[in-house]
Image (cartoon, rainbow, N blue to C red):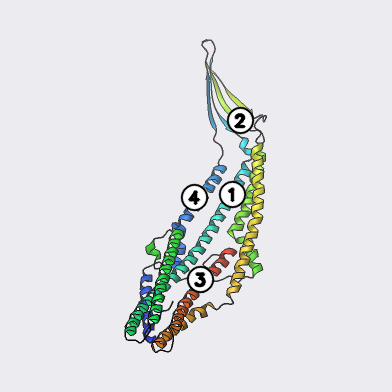
């Protein structure tokens, strides 16, 4: 969206230098993207919800490690007949039925916590990738907005100049109206660009939880390096190190131990108690009690069947997650290889050529060498060239980020 001017390229370059200086000054008061990628882990509302779920899994693991509390037992037996001595018993009773399944339950809870931890890491990497993509989109919209504002200002000056020239008979009414129509289209394009800019800013606020002040003049200062692995190496690495694959593997192991614990929980429950008994007058002794459950009615088969169903579900999810990880890696590599055929830096440099073409087009039109249709085409070419350049840049960044995320690498090295 480089704009058509009525002056020579030297003045145009000076104008763009001023715009760049203004943006640089405003960006110096804002946060840079690398800082945001560090801070959003503590401020993101999405991660806050996931962190709560992770804390619940850790609490479940901690509670399963705890032993059941013993019972303090007290009993006194008195008769109305004073010839019968009063008996008093004080003791402790402990349930030991948990011993059958304690080890299996603890392992299942620990693996479930590790699965949730891996899911949290996966979500964190996914959000980091989304933040980078949204930040580059917002940066592109900001630059396009600045340039398009200058295009509109110059287009209005050109429209006023053409109105004056038409009164003198230098241009036709059709040319004036055609340029006025083009001005309306530019204003409509500016409105759409403003909406996209605000949408990207809103998305950044939603993802990071940071304020508009911290994000509205975001400074893009990072460089994403694609993976140097081959597709086979990336697939093997991803299946071993990608948090999503790790979470699925831990979920399977946790389900296996939960099923084992459910089977062991069908064994009879039992408890043992020990106490001291005293009689008045003067006789003391000890008491040992033992209780053994008779599994006639509640045999806990339902819990075992439920655990078996969860075990089957975890196995299906494990295979599915591995296939999805491999597919995401393959898709990222295909997209990356496709972009290698496009010279993105050259596309960005072509914007400067499109700007000069717009300048020449305006000068040639004023000299009568171009028609109004050729002038409008020159305007469209410059605007579309900038849009295409930023879209290609953003596509390259998004592909690099997705390639690292799908393999299981950190977004920033």
Q: Residues within 10 Å of mark 4 (few under 14, many from 20)?
A: few
Q: N-terminal of the two: label 4 or label 2?
A: 4
Name the one closer to the observer, 74 or 394: 394
Q: Is residue 63 above or below residue 51?
A: above
Q: Residues within 10 Å of mark 2 (few under 14, many from 20)?
A: some
Q: N-terminal of the two: label 1 or label 4?
A: 4
Which residue has dot 3 on it? 394
Mark 1–mark 4 distance (CA, rounded to whole Å): 15 Å
The answer to whether marks 1 and 2 mark residues whose Cβ atoms lie closer than 8 Å is no
Q: Is residue 140 above or below residue 320?
A: below
The kind of secondary structure element at disc 4 is helix
Numbered label attached to residue 112:
1
Q: Quadrant of residue 402?
A: bottom right
Mark 3–mark 2 distance (CA, rounded to whole Å): 69 Å
> Horizontal and vertical percent for residue 403?
58, 67
> Horizontal and vertical percent for residue 238?
62, 63
Q: Nearer the viewer, mark 3 or mark 1?
A: 3
Q: Nearer the viewer, mark 3 or mark 4?
A: 3
Q: Residues within 10 Å of mark 3 (few under 14, many from 20)?
A: many
Q: N-terminal of the two: label 3 or label 4?
A: 4
Which residue has dot 4 on it? 52
The kind of secondary structure element at disc 1 is helix
Left or right: 6 as drawn, with respect to 397: left
The kind of secondary structure element at disc 2 is strand
Say which residue appears at 41% left-offset and 78% top-offset. 178
The kind of secondary structure element at disc 3 is helix
Which residue has dot 2 on it? 272
Say which residue appears at 61% left-offset and 65% top-offset. 329
In this figure, what is the number of numbered marks?
Answer: 4
Residue 224 is at least partly visible in this image: no
Mark 3–mark 1 distance (CA, rounded to whole Å): 38 Å
């Amino acid at each position: 969206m480089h704009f058509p001017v009525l002056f020579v390229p030297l003045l145009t370059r000076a104008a763009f230098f001023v715009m760049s200086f203004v943006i640089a000054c405003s960006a110096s008061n804002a946060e840079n993207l690398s800082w945001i990628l560090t801070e959003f882990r503590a401020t993101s509302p999405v991660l806050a919800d996931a962190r709560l779920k992770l804390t619940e899994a850790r609490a479940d693991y901690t509670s399963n490690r705890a032993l059941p509390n013993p019972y303090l037992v007290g009993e006194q037996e008195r008769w109305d007949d004073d010839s019968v001595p009063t008996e008093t018993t004080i003791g402790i009773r402990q349930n030991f039925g948990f011993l059958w399944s304690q080890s299996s339950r603890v392992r299942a809870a620990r693996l479930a916590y590790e699965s949730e931890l891996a899911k949290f890491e996966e979500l964190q990497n996914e959000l980091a990738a989304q933040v980078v993509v949204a930040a580059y989109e917002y940066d592109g919209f900001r630059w396009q907005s600045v340039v398009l504002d200058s295009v509109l200002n110059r287009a209005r000056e050109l429209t006023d100049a053409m109105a004056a020239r038409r009164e003198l008979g230098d241009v036709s009414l059709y040319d004036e109206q055609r340029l006025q129509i083009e001005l309306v289209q530019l204003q409509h394009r500016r409105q759409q660009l403003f909406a996209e800019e605000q949408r990207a800013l809103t998305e950044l606020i939603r993802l990071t939880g940071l304020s508009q002040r911290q994000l509205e003049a975001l400074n893009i200062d990072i460089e994403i390096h694609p993976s140097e692995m081959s597709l086979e190496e990336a697939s093997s690495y991803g299946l071993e190190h990608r948090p999503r694959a790790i979470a699925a593997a831990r979920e399977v192991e946790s389900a296996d131990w939960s099923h084992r614990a459910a089977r062991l929980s069908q064994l009879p429950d039992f408890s043992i108690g020990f106490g001291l008994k005293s009689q008045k007058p003067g006789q003391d002794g000890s008491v040992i009690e033992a209780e053994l459950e008779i599994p006639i009615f509640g045999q806990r088969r339902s819990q075992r069947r439920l655990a078996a169903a969860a075990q089957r579900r975890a196995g299906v999810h494990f295979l599915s997650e591995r296939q999805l990880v491999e597919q995401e890696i393959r898709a990222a590599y295909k997209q990356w290889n496709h972009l290698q055929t496009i010279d993105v830096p050259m596309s960005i440099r072509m914007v400067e050529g499109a700007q000069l073409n717009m300048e020449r087009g305006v000068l040639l039109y004023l000299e009568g060498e171009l028609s109004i249709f050729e002038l409008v085409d020159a305007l469209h070419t410059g605007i579309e060239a900038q849009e295409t350049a930023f879209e290609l840049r953003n596509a390259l960044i998004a592909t690099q980020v997705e390639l690292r995320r799908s393999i299981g690498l950190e977004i920033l090295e």
